[in-house]
Amino acid sequence: MEILNYNSSMLYRPFGSRTNVLVSMLGFGAMRLPSVDGKIDHARAIELLESGLYGGINYVDTAYVYNEGDSEIVVGELLNNGWRDKTYVATKLPIWDLKKDGDQNDLFETQLKRLQCEKSDFYLLHAINKNNWKRVLETRTLEWLDEEKKRGRIRFAGFSFHDDFELFKQVIDAYDWDFCQIQYNYAQADVQAGVRGLKYAADKGIGVAVMEPLFGGFLTGPQMPPGACRLFEESGLNPVTSALHWLWNQPEPSVVLSGMSEMNQVKDNLLAVSTAEIGGLTDAEGNVLEKVCRFIRDFVPIGCSKCGYCLNSCPVGVNIPLMFDLYNKHILVERKHALQPALYSGNLPHEKASACVQCGKCVAHCPQEINIPEWLKKVAAEFE
Ligand code: SF4
Ligand code: SF4
């Protein structure tokens, strides 16, 4: 087994049986790197990434579209800072940009330049859903993956996924994937591929990376319904540690990707992984998570993970994730605080929910399948 960047306080697992590598159980998701005025702050981002790598993380996950390409550029700078031989980098092909057979090459070459690499360790088809899967087949992208693997420019091929279990099975069975990436956390074990997808892939020896383990930060605590926060406070449990322990308690997830944007998150996550083990979830943790899960399902109106994939598709410039975040928080505090209405009014007119012209262009980009225009109507009615 190959292992990079070994550190005794980190735990490592085989990435399925089709790769020969050991990955750190905590991976660094590079989609929420620290930024200023919407642009990544490169110095702070590198410092943050390096703190994770010094703690034994050996897997960094980025994508063509993250921060309009800047995430890949920062990861390239990180590799040049002495981490090239100690880090596996995963990046993703934007399927929705493929118009015809052959378009993959230009995108892939741009990515290699940004990452300052000659090849990709782990390469994924990004955000497979019904539409994207159709496009993968029409543009012969599976054949292209085979060719690039033969050429040695792609070492391991995988896909990230946002659709139902039936499509997941179909995709898994359609190609000799080395690994896959699914959204999975204790509040959404039966959503999308879910626990059935996790086991289906793992049974076939396909490595599974988990994304959204804290559902875009929602499961970290402060944004939860007050009743859910109280459950954590009364039990003395840490919401982040418990959520991550729930994942690592299971043998199937190889690497859990956390999109860290602050140093305290890196520290918390490294601490959580150092105390993780299969079967290590305590009864107290299990009970609290079950109750919290019920609270969340009952109280949070819009299941937006704040991934931002919808943003570039909007011709008007509505700040969709912010609108949904303000609305969710407003409902969670039972409309009792003036803060969310005040924050809403502080936005520019084109950023507000009421600017939505109901064109529907954003809908296909949402991995959570949220009916964005319908919800924006409700947000506008609530705040205006
Ligand atoms: S439906 Fe509204 S939010 Fe979505 S792309 Fe159109 S204008 Fe933007
Ligand atoms: S609405 Fe959907 S695509 Fe947009 S940020 Fe939320 S989850 Fe992501």
Image (spheres, rainbow, N blue to C red):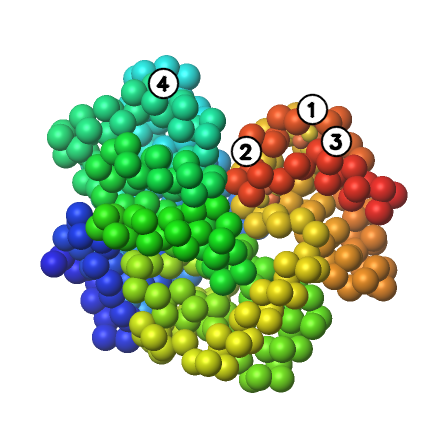
Marks 3 and 4 in Cβ contact (< 8 Å) = no
Q: Which mark, residue 365?
A: 2
Please state which of the two labelled residues, at mark 1 or mark 4, is closer to the viewer.
4
Residue at x 50% of width, y 82% of height: 284
Look at the numbered disc 4 and say if its residue's Cβ is closer than 8 Å to ligand 2.
Answer: no
Is disc 2 surrounded by few (<14), some (14 to 19) or many (20+) residues within 10 Å? Answer: some
Name the residue that disc number 4 marks: 138
Residue at x 28% of width, y 32% of height: 174
In the image, is residue 120 above or below residue 144? below
The amino acid type of the residue labelled 1 equals: Cys
**Quadrant position of the N terminus in the picture:** bottom left
Is disc 3 surrounded by few (<14), some (14 to 19) or many (20+) residues within 10 Å? Answer: many
The amino acid type of the residue labelled 4 equals: Glu
C-alpha distance separating marks 2 and 3 = 16 Å
Name the residue that disc number 1 marks: 359
The amino acid type of the residue labelled 3 equals: Cys
Name the residue that disc number 3 marks: 356
Look at the numbered disc 3 and say if its residue's Cβ is closer than 8 Å to ligand 1.
Answer: yes
Marks 4 and 2 in Cβ contact (< 8 Å) = no
In the image, is residue 139 above or below residue 324? above
Which of the marked residues, 1 or 4, is nearer the chain's N terminus?
4
Element type at mark 4: helix
Please state which of the two labelled residues, at mark 4 or mark 2, is closer to the viewer.
4
User: Which x, y percent locates residue 344?
Assistant: 79, 48
Name the residue furthest right: 384
Element type at mark 3: loop
Is disc 1 surrounded by few (<14), some (14 to 19) or many (20+) residues within 10 Å? Answer: few
Q: Tell me which image quadrant ligand 1 sits in.
A: top right
